[in-house]
Image (cartoon, coloured by chain):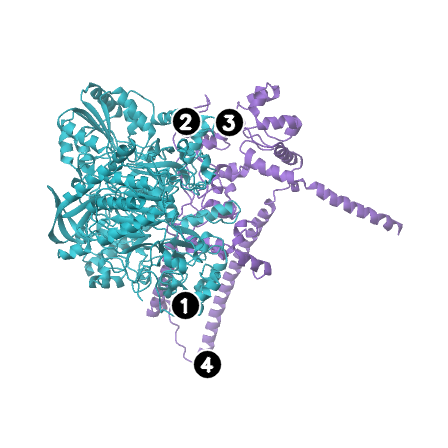
Amino acid sequence: MLRSKFLLPLFALLLALNTLGVAAQDPRADAAYKEGEGLFKAQCTSCHAVNKQVVGPALAKVYERRDADWLRSWIKNSQAVIKSGDPYAVELFNKYNKSVMTSFNLSDKQIDNILTYIKVETEVPAAAAPGAAPAAGGAEATGTNSNMTLFLAIILTLLGVVMLVLSRLTGTLSKLVKEKMGQIVPDSIPLGKILSSKKMAALLILSGCIFLGYATVEQAQMLGRQKDYAPTQPIKFSHKIHAGANKIDCQYCHSGASKGKSAVIPGPSLCMNCHKAIKEGPVYGKTEIGKIYAATGWNPDSMKYLNKTKPVEWIRIHNLPDHVYFNHSQHVVAGGVKCQTCHGEIQEMDVVKQNATLGMGWCINCHRETEVQFKVNNFYKDYEILHEKLKSGAISKVTVEDIGGTECQKCHY
Amino acid sequence: MKQQIWQGLEQLNNDPEFLQHKRNEFREDLPLTGGISADAQTSRRDFLKILGFSVTAATIAASCEIPVRRAIPYVFKPEEISPGIANYYASSFVDGSDYCSVLVKTREGRPIKIEGNSLSGITQGGTSARAQASIISLYDTARLRYPKKEGKKTTWKDIDAEIGSKLAGTNGTIALVTGSILSPSTRQAIAEFKNKYSNAKHIVYDPVSKAGILNANERNFGKRVVPSYRFDRAKTIVSFGADFLGTWVSPIEFTKQYSSSRKVSRENPTMSKHWHFESIMSLTGANADKRFTLLPSQEGIAVVALYNELAGMLGKSALANATLKDAEAQKAIKQVALELKSSMGTSLIVSGSNDANVQVVVNAINGMLGNYGNTLSLDRVYAHQSDDKAMAELVAGMGNGSVGAVILYHVNPAYSYPEAGKFMDGLKKVPVSVSFNDREDETSVGVKYLCPDNHYLESWCDAEPKTGFYSLSQPAISPLFDTRQAPESLLTWAGNRTTFYDYVRAYWQNNVFGKQSKFGNFKGFWEAALHDGIFEIDNPNKTNGTDIMRAEYTPTIATTDTTSIVALATTATETIAWAPTVSTINIDAQGASGSIMQAVSAAKGIELTVFENVVMGDGRYANNPFLQETPEPISKVCWDNVLSVSPKYGKEQGWEEYDVVEVKVGGYAIQLPVVFQPGQAYGSCSIALGYGRTKAGSDKCHVGKNAFPFASFNGETFDYVKSGVTLQKVGGRYEGVGGYGLARTQTHSTIDDERFIVGLASLESYKKDKFAGNHYSLEWDEKAKEGEFFTLYGNDNLYGPHADAFNRGQRWGMAIDLSSCTGCGACVPACHIENNVPVVGQEEVARVHEMHWMRIDRYYLGKDMENPEVAFMPMMCQHCASAPCENVCPVAATNHSGEGLNQMAYNRCIGTRYCANNCPYKVRRFNWFDYQGSDSFYKDTIFDNDEWTTADELSRMVLNPDVTVRSRGVMEKCSMCVQRIQEGKLAAKRENRQMRDGDVKSACQAACPANAIVFGNLNSPTSEVSKLHSNERNYYLLEELHVVPGIGYQTRIKNREALAGIDSYSGDGTAHEKTEEKHEAAPAENGHGG
C-alpha cells in the first residue's frame, strides 16, 4: 500500500519528465532550425556539408571553433575579414585553395538560424533516415511477394499435372469398363487432327488478329514515347552524388523550375561555382570534371578562364511534342509538386532515365487525382461555388480536374 | 424593318454569284486544283500507289529510332535571359514618317512581338499595322547581308577606305539624300559629316511629302515646321482631305486623341463633331460624323468658301469669291462655319493638300478662330521635313554633272521619285554613289557602294518626334548580318570612329540630361530613360506661357512590364484643368486664295488623286507579307492596288467592277482593275501609292502598279492630284494571279444580311433614348427570359448549357466599342504575329483561303451609293456558350472550357470542316496548305513548300514559341489569346493573389490605338468588360440565334442628326416600347454579363 502510494507519484513524475524529454529531444521541430535548414539547403549546400568537407570545410562544431560575431561577419563578407588581417581567416583562405566564399546578404537572425541548424545536426545524430526503414520493409515485402507468386505458380502447375493424370486415368478406366460391358467406344480423335481442323485454324487466325490488333495499338501508343530512356551523356554527371549524397537542392542548378516554362539545364559556368575547388570526382577522377573545364575554357593550373568556350551538348531525355504546353513553375510553385513525382527518385540515379511515359493519359490521371492548393493560394478565391461546397461538406477536396485542369486548352494552344 | 446594310456592291445588288457564295462557307468544292497539288487528278491506281507508299513509309518511319535531341545550355548564361521567359525592351519604331514608341518582346534573344509603350505621351501605347508588322522586316530574307562594291561582296574596312578617299577627292557637291530624320544624334552626325566635307549638302526627301504645310508655315510664321495638333481638345473638327486617322502626319497619336474625345456614355453624352470633305473615301472620312464628297480641285475652293463664311460672321474681309459646284456641300460649309463660330479656340481645321496656298488659308482660318495655342501649336513635328524643291534641284544638278557624290539613306527615288528615269540617268553621271538601304532595291541597281543599315531592332538610336519628346531605341538582338548603322558609317567617313551607342549616349549627356532635374547623375538618368524608352520634358512650351503639350496626358505603366517604371516627366500625374484662351491671329490669305482659284480654273476633265494607304505606305514595306495581307480598311483589297471610281461613274461608262482600265496622264499610263468605290467623288478617281515595286524582294510581293509617276513637281512642292486624266477600258475582268481575280476580302465572310448587324445611332437619338440603335438587344433579352429558346440541350436559361461554369473562377469575354473603332487594322497583323497565324499570299486570298483570326468587317449603310454611312466591326470567334460549331464536331476537337472559351484542339481535329460550315459568324479558318512549314520536310526535298513566303528558317524566327504552329488540314480560329490568359493566371498564382482586372490583355486589345477593345473576366461584376456588357449600348451579334456569345458590341454613336432608315432598328415595332419601360426601371439587369 505504502509502496504503491510512493510509486504512483514517482511514476507520474517520470512520465512528466519523459514527456518533457520528448519535447527537448526533438530540436528539429524548432522554427529556428527549420528556417536554418531551408537557408542552409538553398544557400550553403553547394559548397558545404555539416559532417563532410566539400568545397569548403565541414561545418560540424564550427560554432566552437569561432564565435558567433566572427562567423556573422565572415558569412556576410569573407573577403573583408581576410583583408582585415585576421590570422585565422587568412589561414583558412590559404588552406582551401584561395577559393573565395560568396558574400551572403543574410540578416544576423538568419545566420543564427543556420548555426542552430548546424549545431543540431552536429550534436544530435540524425535518426535513421526516415525513408530508409519503410524502403527496406518495402523491399522485403516485394521479395515475399515474388516468392509467393513463384510458390503459387509451382502449386498450380503441380495441380494441373495431377488433374491431367487423373483425367486420363478416369478416361482410360471408364473406357475399359464400357468395353467390358460390350459397348463400342469410338477411338478418340487424335490431337493432330484437331489441330489441323478448319475450326481450329479459324480460331487461331481470329485470336492472332486480335492479338496483333492489340499489339499494334499498344505499340502505336508507345511510338515516340521513351520511358526508361537513359542515354549516355557527354559528361557522366551523377545526380546520385550531387542531389543524393551532397543534398544540393534541385533548384540550385535547375533554377528555371520555379520561374517559368523550362526548368533549365545549367550551363557549365554554374558547375564552376563548386568545381573550381573540387577538381577530382570520387568515381572518374579528373576526366569528367575536366570536361567542364574544357567547356568553360578554365585552366585549373593557372586558375584562369582562357576565353575558349565550347558548349556541352546534353542529350535531352524528357521530350514533349510541340503541341503540348508545359510549364514547370505551374507545377513546382503553384501546384507544389515534388520533382520526384514526375522525374522519379532522381537523387538515386547515377544515370538519369525517364521515369514516366509522359503520355497524355499519365498527365490526365495526375490531374484527376491531385488536389489543388485551394485554401492556401489566394488565386483560388475566385472559385466561390467550390469554396461553398467545401464548407458545406458537399465535396471533400478540389482536384485539378475540378477547376478545369483536364480541358484541352489548358495544355494545347 | 430590315437594316439597309451592305459590304459591297455585289451584296447591294444581290448579285447571283454573291448570293450563292453567301450561303456557303467554302467556295470551292474538293478536290482543290492548282496551288501545291498541281492539277491533281487522282485515279484508282494512283490511290493504291499512294496508299502503298504511305504504309511502307509509315512502317519504315516507325521502325526508325527516335531522333536524339540535344539540349545545349549557354556556357555563360547572360543574366537577363531565362529560357522560356520573355523579356521586354523599350524601343522606338522609326521608319520614314512613321513613329511609334514600342516595347519589344523577346524570347531567348529573338524579338517576336511589338507592343505599344503606354508611357509615351505621343503614342500612349497605341500601335499601327505598320509598327506591328515592322518585326517581320527584321527577318526579311531580301535584306542585304554584307557591304557590296559594284555588286561584289567586300568588307567594311575596304569600303570605308575607298569611300573615304573618293569623298575627299571629289569637287562636286556631296548630296546626302535622306527621309525626314527624327533622331537628334543622327542629325548631329550629319552635321559632323558636313563639317568634314564642306561641299556636302543634306537633302530631305519624303516620297509622300508634307512640304505644303511646311512652306505655308514658313510664309506665315517664318518657321518651316509641321505643327503639333490636339484632336482631343477640339470640339469641332473639320478636315479637308486630311486622313489623320490613317496616314496624315501622326496617325497613332491622333487616333488616341480622337477616340478619347468620342467615348460616349449615359453620364457624359458628349463627343466632338467631325466634318469631313474629301474626294476619296479615306479611313478618316469613313469615321466622320458628316462626310461630303468633293472633287480634288474643289477642296481648295471649299477651304476658301469656309474662310469667307467665317469672315462674314466675324466681321473680317472675305477672300476671292468661291462657290462650290455641289449645292449640298456649299450648304454644309455654312453650317460648319456656324458651329465653328460657337467653338472658338476649341476647333481644328486641317487639310491634306500639299499645296502651300491651301495650307495658308487653313492657317488663316485656325488663326481667325483662335485655335493656335489651344488645339495646335508650332512645335515641330520632326517626322515631316521634306524639301521637295531641294530634291528637284538635286536631280537637275545630277543631270548637269555638278554632283560629285550621292549618298542615299533609306530613300528609293528610282521607285518613288515622280521622274525616276531622270534620277537614274543623273545617277549614272555621279562618280560616287552610296546607298544605306537595307536591300538591293530599284535605286541600288545604279549605286556603286552598298553599305546596308541595321534594322531598327538591331540599332542604338534616339528620336525626337516632336519638340521636347525624346525617345530611345535599343537593340533587341545582335545584327543578324554583317550590316552597320548608317549614321555610324557617316561618322566613320567623317573621321569619327566612335560607335553609335557611345555617340547617342554622349549626345544625351550633353544635350538632354540638362533638361531635367530629377536625376543628379547621368547614369541614373540614362538607365531610367532606356528603361522607359522615352524622356519627355515637362511642358516644352512653358516658356511661351502656354501649357499645350503634356498637360492632360496621364500615362500608365506598361502592363507587359512588371518591373517598376520610373516615369521621368513629372507632369505624368499632374492634370491641369484646361480651358481655351482664345487669341486670334490675323493671317493674310488674300494672295493664296487667288492662286487657289487660278489653279482650280485650270482643272479639267477627270481628276486623279494618288495617295498613301493605311497599310502599304510609300512602298517601303512592300516585301512585308503581313502588311500586304492586311486588307486596306476601306476597299478591303489585299496584295494589289486598284483604280477607284464612283459607282455612278463606272456604270455610266458601262464598266463592270474588276474590268481592267488604263489610266493615262501625260506620257504615263498603267492598267489596273477598276473598283466601284462608294464615297469616291463622281468625276474623279484614285490610286494607292506604294505598289508596283519591282525589286523589293520576293516576286510574290511585286504586286500592283506604281502610281508615283503620276505625281509631279509644280515648282514648289510635289503635286499628288492630276486633272485631265483619260480612262479607257482595255480588257475584261482582272485575272490576278492564277486567274482567281482580285484578292479582295470584303464579301469573303458575309454574315447573313437579313439580320441586324451594326447598331448605329445618332447622338441626338441617344440623348433622348439611351437604347437608341439597340432595341434589338432588348427584344431578344426579353425572349430569352421567357424561355422562348430551344437549343440542342433543351430549354435553357439565359446563360445557356454551361450554367455552372459561370459562377466560378473566370469567364473570359470581350467588349468592342464600335463607336471607338476606327477600322485602322492594327489588330490584324498583331493577331497574326501573336498567334502564328499564317500569311497565305495573293492567290490564296483570292481563293478565299485567308487565315485572318481577326478581321474588320467594313459595312456601308443606307441607300446612298455615292456617299454611304460607314461602320467598322472587328470580328473574331465569339466564343459562344452554346456554340453551333461544338455540336457538329465528330471528334470533339472543338469544345467549351469552364472559362468560357471555345477551345480548339488542333491535334484532335481531322479537318471535316463541319464547324466552319455551322458558324454563323464565319470566323473559322481552315489550313488548306502547310503555310508555315510546320510539318514539311527540309528545304529542296520532296514536299518542299518554300514557295510560301513565310516557311523559311529566317522568317520562322518570329514564331511565338508558346503557340502551336498548325499543320495542314486542321481548323483554327481566335483563341482569345489563351496563352496570355494562362500566363496571367500563372503570374497571379505565383504571387499568391487573385487576378486583377487588366492582368491579361489580348493582342488585339494591346495593339488598338483607339482603346476600342476591352478584355476581361465577365464573372467579376467590377471588371471593365462586365460593366460594358451591362451597358445599355451593348448587344450581342445575331442574338436571335441564341448562341450566347462572349463578345459584346457597343453601338456606334455618330454626332449628327437622326439617320433615317439606319438609326434605330425596330423588330416588330410594338414590343420594345414595353420592354424599354421595364429596363428604365431596372437598368442594371439589361445585359447578361453575369
Chain holding disc 1 = B
Query: In the image shown, does B278 or B148 lie closer to the viewer?
Result: B278
**Residue under pointer 1:** B1073
How far apart in space, not on screen, are marks 3 and 2 (Cα)?
15 Å
Task: Say left or right for B1042 vs A42.
Answer: left
What's the amino acid at mark 1? Glu
Circle number at residue A181: 4
Q: How far apart in space, not on screen, are marks 1 and 2 (Cα)?
A: 83 Å
Amino acid residing under circle 3: Ala
Q: Secondary structure at mark 1?
A: helix
Q: Secondary structure at mark 3?
A: loop
For the residue marked with disc 2, what is the amino acid? Gly
Tell me: B873 left or right of B552: left
Palette colour of chain B: cyan
Q: Is residue B201 above or below residue A330?
A: above
Neighbours of disc 1 within 10 Å: few (<14), some (14-19), many (20+): few
In depth, the one of A94 and B541 nearer the eye is: B541
Q: Is residue B775 left or right of residue A384?
A: left
Q: Which mark is residue A297?
A: 2
How far from the left and from the top, in percent, is residue A347?
A: 52, 41
Q: Amino acid at mark 4?
A: Met
How far is disc 2 from disc 4 in space, using C-alphas?
100 Å
Chain that is purple in the image: A
- Real-space Cα distance between discs 4 and 1? 107 Å
- Residue position for label 3: A277
